[in-house]
Amino acid sequence: VGAGAGGGGTRFDLEKETELRFEVEAGEKVHLELLTGLAEVFGSELNRNKKYTFGPGSKIAVFTWQGCSVSLSGKTEVAYISKDTPMLLYLNAHTALEQMRRQAERDNERGPRVMVVGPTDVGKSTVCRLLLSYAVRLGRRPTLVDLDVGQSGVSVPGTMSALCIERPADVEEGYSVQAPLVYHFGSTTPGTNIKLYNKLTSCLAEVFSQRCEENRKASVGGCIINTCGWVKGSGYQALVHCASAFQVDVVLVLDQERLYNELKRDLPHFVRVVLLPKSGGVVERSKDCRRESRDEKIREYFYGFRSALFFPHAFDVRFSDVRIYKIGAPSIPDSCLPLGMSQDDTQLKLVPVTPGRDLTHHVLSVSCADEGEEGAGGVRRGVLESPVCGFIVVTNVDTQAQVMTVLSPAPRPLPRHTLLIMDIRFIDLK
Ligand code: ADP
């Protein structure tokens, strides 16, 4: 560790295979610059003499395979060098996956489908990002499937998505999201509607498999599936369901031997289940911290990020011009269900909602579902299984005038008229 100045900051000299970990204080920014050598942040290489800026609450590791020196300026909560990282094991996992891709290429088969699992805060998203960046740096085109409805790396919270990765994640901004495939789930834990969660997992698997049939590169690239940290009961069953829906070949279990043993027991024998340690650098996030990062993700959707600022629009939408639904009716006792209906049906039911004041601040998904396909009894098919084309936030509801005011990334009119309510709320302070 070196003191002394490098561009006005503190200089750190890193030996090979070590990493500099730092956290940015609330309300602060930290600048990072690579002075000599080679280094990467979660698999994305740093450019020499470029200033990278990280916002409040960022938790970053600068890793070097060869050795490097960097300069850090701004207020960090902690900043230290660690020699004890699992990066070599993660690299081995990547190498094994790359061998599978090569074999797939040779034998005209499909590439590895990988599921990353573990409890919350073990670095699942980080491992996914690392594996994707390493693969794409070798010219592969892997697909990220993000099933973490609490902290999606691709879209706003409450969604499940897939994204074809064409370049390593941006060091500061993460994935560049061009044309992700996004489904509406509606809340931040799978437990609120596990039937829907499993159904959407199957939808994503189907679309991905179709794409693999049409696109050889996507097929060879395979996929990396990021999952939720809920690994017990129905959460565990959802992992088993996902493994079967995607026909995964490899499961990487982070940090939990019990989960590893359960999956080894319950998944078919040809699935390779591998236990990997978590990095000591992974920081546990408080409930507040999670809520803040969810809020930030929604704010970014509407207002953009440093290099690409957006200017959202506010306009009125008449109740009569849209159809608003919530997915899932409250469960009722079996004895009260109409003949031939099961609880499953109620969880996947589209329930029309009349807008009221309580809709204020809710995030709504704009469904891509075909319109005017009204079936018997007003229950429209296909909305659940349709991706969404965007999101709006209700900022005001006027029941007298029968209009609501919304915040939208695009000017009026809304591209579609089927809206799905999320449990998630966003208060626009701008
Ligand atoms: P999970 O997906 O399991 O909830 P994440 O991958 O999101 O966990 O990691 C949790 C937090 O820890 C993130 O803010 C991430 O940036 C940070 N983090 C991950 N690995 C490291 C590391 N080696 N050093 C410092 N921070 C890290």
Image: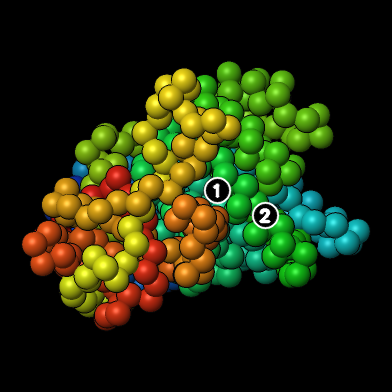
Residue type at mark 2 is: Glu
Q: Does ligand 1 reach within 8 Å of label 1's beta carbon?
A: no
Observer able to see residue 417: yes
Count the labels in the image.
2
Callout 1 secondary element: helix
Q: CA distance from mark 2 to mark 1?
A: 10 Å
Residue at point 35%, 37% (across, down)? 283
Check whether the beta carbons of the residues at disc 2 and disc 1 lie within 8 A of each other: no
Which residue is denoted by mark 1 in the rendering? Answer: 200
Residue 416 sits above or below residue 56 on the image: below
Residue at point 52%, 26% (across, down)? 234
Residue 192 position, x and y percent, is 40, 35
Along the line of sight, which residue is nearer the eye, 250 or 326? 326
Residue 23 position, x and y percent, is 28, 46
Which residue is denoted by mark 2 in the rendering? Answer: 206
Residue at point 72%, 21% (across, down)? 265
